[in-house]
Amino acid sequence: MKIFEETKFNIPELKGISAKSVEEHLKLYSGYVKNANTILQKIDEYAKDSEANAYALGELQRRFGFEFDGMRNHEIYFSHFEGAPTALSASGSLYKKIEEEFGSFDGWLARFKSIALTRGVGWAVLYVDPKTDRLLNAWIDEQHLGHLTGLSPVLMLDVWEHSFVLDYLPSGKKNYVEDFFVNLNWQTAEANFANAKR
């Protein structure tokens, strides 16, 4: 059976987000990779007698979406910190598309940050819809509930408490969201946008 491999990230020192927090967060990512592989292995085993194992197979299939999306979401999230913080170029295609879709970059940014402050655990996501050439913001509950089918993530912000509570305490979510954008290498989002449009 083919297995998913962990991505190794080269994350520099970040403002507000400690190396210890990143280290512990990466351990959670590692768990998603491991669990996704384990579930697929178990599905293969149980599928040999799918009638006798129908309940277990159903539960494993439900769980797989959580683990797989947890793996992929974190790969996009951690990639945003690689390299060094880089501003989004006002002459680039992503900036222009944000202005076209939302009226202004600052207007989009305020809206996106408000989504990130949604109560509960989940993700704030900026997607591109290749079918309609639109940008859409969304909130994902947990790792997998609310993903928009057929759309490609451009920017993903993890707002589970595990992503910020070590450094910001539960009440510091807003500061964490601000620091995410201070630390963001926008070139990664630009690359995601370009790749989704191919």
Image (cartoon, grey):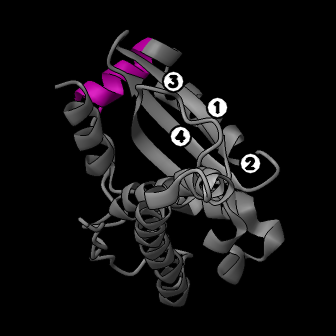
Residue lying at the far left of the rendered structure: 198
Q: Do the residues labelled 1 and 4 touch (CB within 8 Å)?
A: no
> Are circles 2 and 4 on residues that touch, CB within 8 Å?
no
Query: Mark 1 = which residue?
Result: 111
Residue bearing the label numbered 2: 117
The quarter of the rendered structure image containing the C terminus is top left
Q: Name the residue under label 3.
A: 136
Inter-mark Cα distance, 1 to 3: 11 Å
101 up-or-down from 11: above or below: above
Kindly identify which numbered label has been placed on residue 75: none
The x, y position of residue 8, in whole percent, is: 27, 76
Image-quadrant location for residue 109: top right
Say which label, 1 or 3, has the lower sequence index: 1
Residue ID for mark 4: 125
Q: Which of marks 1 and 4 is in front?
A: 4
**Magenta range:** 90-100
* Position above or below: 70 against 156: below
Which quadrant of the rendered structure holds the N terminus?
bottom left
Q: Identify the residue at horizontal 28%, vertical 40% (top origin).
A: 192
Q: What is the C-alpha distance between the residues marked 1 and 4? A: 11 Å
